[in-house]
Every structure is written in C-alpha cells, then in structure tokens.
Image (spheres, rainbow, N blue to C red):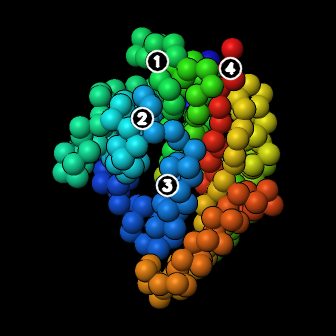
Amino acid sequence: MNTLYNPTWIRNFYNDYGMKEWDRWERDPLGRVKWLVHVHYLRKYLPAGKRVLEIGAGAGRFTQVLAEMTSHITVADISPGQLELNRQQAKAHGFDHAVEGRDECDMTDLQGVFADEEFDAVVCLGGPVSYLFDRAEDGIRELMRVTKPGGPIFLEVMTLWGIIHEMLPSILTIDPAINRQIVATGDLVPSLLAGKHHCRMYRAADFRRLLEGIGLLIELMFTSNVLTATWGEKLREIPEDSETWKHLMAMELQACREPGCLDMGTHLVAVCRKPQE
C-alpha cells in the first residue's frame, strides 16, 4: 500500500530529538503559553482517577500532569529513546509511581498491545496525529477501539495557517510553487522539502470532518499561541507572576477556543468523546 506515513522516520527523528521534546514547552515564553493552554484544558476535561493511555507521550511533560490526576497511566510511544527519557524523567521528578507500564508501539496498529475498551480515556497531545498522514483515520480508530464507550479522547495536530503565520519570514524563502503545493495539501514531505520536518498540517474544518466522519463526538476544539505567535521577544519582558501576564493568559484562553481563531494557532486540539453504545 502506498502511503505517506513513515514510522521509521518518526522513530528516528524522536530518538535523535532527545530531551528537546521535554524542554520545548519551557524553553521560551511562546512554549510556556502553549503549555499553560494545554494544561488548562487537560485538567478541565479529563476526569480524575481514570485509567489513561497517553500515546505519543514523549519524554513525559504531560505524563507529569496526568500523574497529578490519576495513578493509572499507561505510557506509549513509537520512539524507544523517548520512552527511556520518560522513565528517567518520571524517576527524577517523582511521578513514576503513577505509570503502570510503558509500551513501544505504532498508533496505527495497537492490536496485540492493548485490548478493546481497556482505558477510560486516551491522551494524544503534542501533535502525533499529524505524523500519520493518510493513516490518520487508522490511528484514531485504534484509539477509539481501546477507549471505553463515553470516554474522552484528546487528539492534537499541527495547523496549516497558524504555522505559516508564526514561521512566515522563513517560509517566504521557499520556492512559491512548493509553498502553493504545501498549502493545497497541508503536507510537508521529503519530496518537497528534504531535511525539513515531515508532517500533515490541518485546517480546523478538515480536522473536524475527519473526526466526525469516524464517529467521534467533539466537545471542544482549542488551539494555542493565537495571540502570542509572533510576540516571542516581547513576552520575555512580561514576568509570569505579573498582572499583565495573567491578563494575557486570560485573553489567550478565551481566544484559543473561538471558532474564528482555530486556524491561527500553531497546534489544534480536539477534546472528543467515544459515543456510548
């Protein structure tokens, strides 16, 4: 079967990426804003005490947050290097007690790894679905399969226009014909940009159609860095404990779920629910 999905590239990329996957949420104010938005809605929509599959878990940033909410976490990732970092970070930061197991696996085929309806909830944050390309439906159906009826499923992709907005100066250095093809498909692939990041970027409407077509119920869609995407240096001047920062975050949290803003953040999260049987 011809497919754009390349699990070997993903595995190798994240093995090499190492601790950058842990650090990227804190390395600058833009990452910090993105982090706070994600954590806000994760805590709001994930019930406490549930058995959770965190897939595409990476080095454990969200595992640490989940450990505040439940002691029944199964961590999964396609990268053995990231799983080992997850283990190390969990021990170093005191949340390993909440992890029941770690599994190296491919999201598009979880048969033999996890049973039907094994988990109360699934968390797939950071953008793993964007790496599935034309296998996205297969991967999401697998996550539905392992979730109990009525359970929440958090799914995240990278956005097309939001990333163009944030990265515009460098994007304008690319051949316009290549840019037009990327905009038409949403796909960053080696045949277009060798050596660059490889993923599918989504429009909000396309992501919604994908999820609803599979049968998921969407409770909320939110994005991140709507107001802040091009203000990285200015944000460094705002102390996080200041009233100005608090006001900024209040506006960011409001804007990030406005329907008209969903395409302008860099990442898009859908808080879904598996239908009751």
Residue beneath disc 4: 276
Confirm whether residue 163 shows in the render: no
Say which mark, if any, is on residue 49.
Answer: 2
Decide which of tag 2 and tag 3 comes sooner along the chain. 3
Tell me how far mark 1 sits from mark 2, CA to CA: 15 Å
Secondary structure at badge 3 equals helix
Q: Closer to the N terminus: mark 4 or mark 1?
A: 1
Dot 3 or dot 4, earlier in sequence: 3
Task: Measure the alpha-carbon separation of dots 4 and 1.
Answer: 15 Å
Total numbered labels:
4
**Amino acid identity at mark 1:** Glu
Residue 162: x and y, percent? 68, 61
Residue beneath disc 3:
39
Q: Nearer the viewer, mark 3 or mark 4?
A: 4
- Report the amino acid beneath label 2: Gly
Q: Residue at x 59, y 77 (%)?
A: 248
Instruction: Of the two numbered discs 1 and 2 on the same chain, state the one appearing first in sequence.
Output: 2
Say whether disc 4 or disc 2 marks the residue closer to the N-terminus: 2
Residue 81, image x and y in percent? 28, 40
Q: Amino acid at mark 4?
A: Gln
